[in-house]
Image: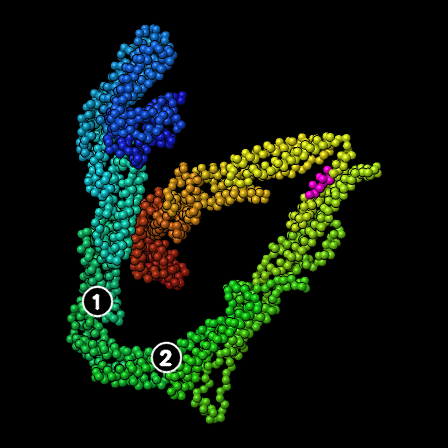
Amino acid sequence: MDQVIQDGLEDQDVVTVAVDPVCLGWIQDKLRLLLYGPSSDWQAWLDKAWQPAAHEQPIAAFLTRLKVCRLLAITYKPDDVNFTMMHELPPKFYRMVYFIKDPTKFITRSNIAQVVQFGVLKAGYLARAVSSASADDAKAPSSDGANDGTAGSMEALLRLVGSVYLPQVINSGSWPDAVRKEFLAYTHRFMANLTEAVHEAQGRTVLYMPAEELAGLSISKAAWDKHLTRRLETTLIYWTRQITNVLNRQDCSDSGQQAGPLVEIEFWRSRSLDLSGIRAQLEGRQVADMVAVLSLAGSSYLAPFLQLKELIQHEAVAAQDNVRFLTCLEEPCKQLSKACPLEIPGLLPQILDRIRMIWCLSRFYNIPERITSLLKRLSNEVINRCSAALRLGDIFTGDVSGPMDILQQSMAAGAAWKSCYERTAAAVGRHCPRPWDFDMGSLYSYIDAFLQRCRDLLEVCEAQLQFAPSTKLPVFSGTRGPEVERNIADIQVAFQGLVKQLKGLKYDILDIKAIQWYDDFNVFKVGVRDLEVMLENVLELALDTAPSLQGTLELLEGFQLIAKRDAVKRAVQKHVSVFYGKFMGEINAAKKHFDLLRRCPPGSPLLPKYAGAARAAATLLRRLEQTHGVLIAVKPMLPSVPEEADALTAYELTHQSMQQFIVNTHTEWFNTIDNSISKQLQDNLLTQDKADRGLLSMNFNPQLLAMSQEVVHWERLRMAVPYIAMEIQAQREKYRVLRDNMLMVVREYNKVLVALDAEERKLFFDRIRALDRRILPGVSKLNWVADKHALEFYYKEARKHCRIADCSVCEFKTGMTKIDTLCKGIAEGLLINVEKKRLYDHTEFEAVQATHHDMAKKRLIAAHAEIKKTLAEVYTHFEADGEDVQREWVKFTVKVDKKVEDALRHTVKRSLHELSRLLTGDSKTEVLPIFRVTLILERNQHVELRPTIQQLFDMTQKVCRDLVTVVQVVARLAQQATPRQLKELEDRGEPPPSHPQTYHQLISSDEEVTLKTIVQISTGITSVVDPVQACLEHFEKRYKKLWDQDKDAYIRRYEKAQKPLSSYEADVTEYMNKAAEIQMEETTANIKFLFVDCGPLKQTLNMHCELWKAKLTNLLNNLAAAELRNLHEYFRNGLEALSKAPQNLEQLAESVGLHRRLVNEKAKTAASFEPLRDKYRMLERFEVQVPDAQLEQLDKLDLAWARFQVGLDEAAARLERSKDAFRDKVKAMLEAFVRDIATMQEEFVRGAPYDAETTTSRQALAFVTRWNNATTSARHKATEIKSGMDIFSIPQPPYKELVQIEKELELLDKMWSLVAEWEGTYSGWKDGLFKDLKVVEMEETAARFSKQVTKLGRDVKNWLLWGWFRDKIDAFKKTMPLITDLRNPAMRQRHWQQLMEHIGTSFDPADTNFTLETVMALRLDQHAEFIAELSVNATKELAIETSLAAISATWADLGLDLTEYKGAYKLRSTEDIFAALEDNSVTLSSMKASRYYLVFEGPVAHWEQTLSLVSETIEIILQVQRNWMYLENIFIGSEDIRKQLPQESLMFEGVHRTFIRSMQRLHAKSNVVQATTAAGVLTAFQDMDAKLEKVQKSLENYLESKRQQFPRFYFLSSDDLLEILGQARDPQNVQAHLKKCFEGGSAWFMLLCLCRSLHTFIAVSVPLLIVLLSTSPAKSIK
């Protein structure tokens, strides 16, 4: 069954088998023999020539298929950079490396060197055969001279062995028969292989004939010779295999997949000769004799051979017939093999006609497989000729004109081949019984792939035309011109990089089997698309920054010159349309401004009414003319767009209307000029407005000024001016200078007045009065035509006195500003200094505020002095003025004094409020602690606060008092009276005015500013009393027992009570828990403005707990020590008493009694040991420092007890004298064993593996195993000794050395086992694939090892091994964050690329060789921070990627909610759509705000555009749907309305049909995105909306006309009126609406009167009667 499966696999055309990389590498290493000469660069040559798709398939077949016994690597010319892999010998070659294997053995990586033989042939001759047993020969390929010297050596060897050596062996009688037969068997096998190899190299199949086998023997005798028949069978089997191989070669597939039809013809010619030769050999006498012998011998191998013999006859005839038919193809195929692509279409018809003839007439070749193969080879020849004509180098260098022609011709040749084939196939179908129903996919696969490759290369050529640096760039103007040129140059450089990537591909681009091309070309194509987008972006950038439309035209012209690709041309055309839109917009804007200009002439004072309008129109016209002129110049270069004609027509109409407007405006102005206008120059120069503070104004007639401006502008427009206007304009400069000077006088005079308020004017009264006298002539006497010198003197004097007055005012204002600034500084300063987040002691706070108050006093004194100084400086301007001014000065000082008082009041208020806010807080501020206080345990045994609340209260009150007292240093500034007033009071004998209260007196007594705030501060201080008291009571209540009880008295009572050990434990634990509870108490607490430090109190309480614990444990220690001393004294006294030899019978009786008592008390004594140890264990648990002497006594207790027991035994021994001999022997053995144990411990200590530097884990574990065996043996020996000791009641010694060894061994075993386990685990991680690492499992494992190591550290901390292993585990744990970051599932290839660029090393994280060891070798731990940041970035980017996927999924599932409505569909609900739009828009906006947005810029931009289009489309659909539903009832349901509005009805019917079709399309697509973003949907609905608006507007106009005819209709809504008009045939339906039209009507009656052919309706109302006449039923109501 396996053989059948294997044969089935071998018969398939293509078998995809994975090639063992070791075997593949072995064969690749031998391919260096293809190189002629030095092989130093053979690896580079192999990398370039290796084609996996073409080479690995033959190698896989050779390595895995038993029937494929040879593999050939061939080059066809000396400088060939490629090679071909095949299984059959080609007719010609230049150099060939061959591989031959044993067909009975499978090839593995372990036996390939033994099973496969290899060698090299040159120029069709055998050069050298090399056995694979000497693999080193492959590393030194033979030189050219060696090849020439060994030519024909195998053929010579065949002749030499066959004619010389073999006959000698056969005829030799000196060889033993068995040896000779065995030698001949191997020799014949070798000769068969050699014969086949020699003739196969010549393209022939020769059967090896062992001539000596039947020499001199009869047929019957030879049949009885078993050895002979076995050799004949071996030869027959070899022949069978040879013939089978020849018969199995039914085609020339091994000659290469791209071979042409000539190869097929040559194959059948060679096959015919080969089969004829085999047939001649099989008909020979020697073959007949062999057949006869084997037939007589009954060989089972004969029948298959005879069948092959008959099959050879048939195949030879078939091959001859095939050659005869194929010969007719040879001549046209030779022409085809030399044709260029342009000639190919002319040669194909005759070739296909001859193939058609072969199909119809041939007996053997006309099977579909062979014809299909022949057609494929014809297709290959077309591909080969087109490929040969194409020069890829020209494409990559940018010279693409020739290659583009060749590519077009090649594509035409491919299309011609397909069309010729289809015509021929059609003819075959018409005239032959068997049609060509071949598989078109396989037949066209190569030619289609080649045509696609040509199209791809043609696209590369087009890209070269667009982006190659050889393309000459135009000069781009503007500020962005260099940037545009630089961006285009960058695009060209980027394109050269893409071309360089294609040029550097390691495979033949024209090889259609090189499927890597699709990926590489897609990369190139995407890159070109990106460059197109970049170029379009450059175009966008250039046009966006174009300063004007003229600049836009120049840029469009430049980009049109370089636009070669369709996308770029479309972009330019789009922007041309945009330009015309902008130009049209500029025309419309100009028209809009022009229309506005005609309705409202410019109101600017710089532009006159008439000339200004004309100048504005001329400016608009000139701007349009400039753009139009540039457009006409570049228009031939730009693509045509539909908007062009409309824009130019609009320009011409606008141009004409503007020119006509300028002419009409000039005529209108000319007619407005009056000849009497010159009389207005007789007016006075100035006027003074007494109602408005006495301000001046220039009295120059506005008509004169307007006329002057008009003349100036009309002259610039080169238009005519009236004579009187020209005369006045001649004096224009004189009037201008005079007007300017008058304006300066007015401005300077008004500046003085405006700068002063009413009170300040009183202060400056004398100066203003003097200035008015200087100004008066211009107001009352001088006019515009007065004497020039008088006018000049006037305005100079006036300006001089104005400047003097202005200087005084400025100095006064400066002083006032300075005083205001000083007052503001006083007000903004704080009289309290509290640093944020700083804690103060109460004394420290008081000292800080005192220092700050001193600084504040100095600041206030300095400000007060500066204010006084400023007042004195200002007063210098007024001290010489009159009494009224002096009295005003007194008022001014009072005003300044009030400002200072307000500033001081404000600073005191702010300072107190700030302190109050710090203590009590407000709605915006949380109270923060500012005072540090401490809880302590006072000597009165109470918990108290230091400082106390009262001390804090007193301190804050003092600070507040000192704060207010600071203002005492500032004296009052106000004057009480002028000197003259004081003198008058003195003259009258009246006292001077009393001095006012000081600032301090006023502020300190101000209830609002000071008193209330101080009360608030006091309240804030006292508000903390309750929470502080609660805190004190908390500690008093919970912990008072600790300090309130007499400790010494309690301990004395405790000792007398003799409480059990559990009571000690419970009490000590209680105090320890109490200490822990105290530790859990807050060390610090914030109580409003207090920072309460509980640390000293906690420390005191802990001290009390420790004191209680110490007293209890000291008591326990004293009791244990006394008990321990008593035990040791008990042992010592007993042994001393028993050690005394009895001197008499009484002493003996006492000794025996004492011995008996001591023996009886042994159990009680031993039972007291454990309670004693429990006490010491408790002391150890409670961390009580026990004296070393006690611990030593406790450690020696067992030894003392043992000695005591030994002493008892010795005493018993002395009483048991009869057993002395055995007792002595047992004791001797015990002593020797104890000595051996001591020696054993010393050896163990010397050799124990405590250090990992000199010992491996395997050695250490072996040491532990060895010593475990030793200790087990020692324990066995101790057991044997103990059996003898028990006889004599000798107690067993503790064997401390042995116990110590066992303990150390146990620890070593645990430690080294842990090390070995770690090494095995880490080795698995290190050598496994990095991508398969389980980080969580690694972290858990490392933590487990770390925990175990820490646990062992309690016993082995002093071992170097422990420290080394702990450091090793810790080092690995430090690398875990790095591994975790690298194993982040969010890591993508771009992140790995960034890492490789950062470390400067390339690696493949997906490679099977990328392991943890590779990570360590790359030293990535040195870049841990970068990798961590990269991992975080990857996680953030994954979030964006997930969000984008969620958006895509949302819109993939979201459908339109459409429902049927009157035979159509309407959009029912859009809540889900708008909710999704809002959510996703917010999501996309947040993505763009992320710094990780750039990676997903394309998808985000796509979704933003898509969602924007969806939103806009949904909104316009809803709007159209509302209008359609409203108007559908009107136009579809009312025939009258349709007749009244026929055009609108037709328009609505068109919209109606379009809307129904559009909604049906939306319903068919269903999905929101697909439906709303389809081409033309938005445009269609926008068009419908515009039409519906027109219809609705016409409908409104129609209703308005009806309301004008019957004004009562204004009381009705549009819907009611439409209902009345739509039901005009039935006036009874109007009844429901009459109440709205007529007020006071309660009931209506309709009376029908017939009058001839007229219908008259009379409506009767109770309060009034109104007759409504309708002359015809078809007319609406009037």
Percent of width and height locating residue 1612: 36, 59
The one nearer the camera, 135 or 421, is 135
Q: Which mark is residue 811?
A: 2
Amino acid on which the number 1 mark rests in the picture: Arg
Q: Main secondary structure of the magenta part?
A: helix
As for residue 688 lying within the magenta part, the answer is no
Mark toward the start of the polypeptide (1 vs 2): 1
Left/right placement of residue 1046 relative to residue 419 reads right
Instruction: Tell me where the magenta segment starts and ends, as one range.
Output: 1196-1206
The one nearer the camera, 1627 or 127, is 127
The one nearer the camera, 843 or 892, is 843
Q: Are marks 1 and 2 in contact (CB under 8 Å)?
A: no
Percent of width and height locating residue 1123: 73, 47
Q: Which residue is mark 1?
A: 615
10 Å crowding of disc 1: few (<14), some (14-19), many (20+): some
Residue at 57%, 38% (x, y): give it.
1246
Percent of width and height locating residue 892: 42, 82
Residue at 47%, 44% (x, y): give it.
1376
Left/right placement of residue 1368 relative to residue 601 reads right
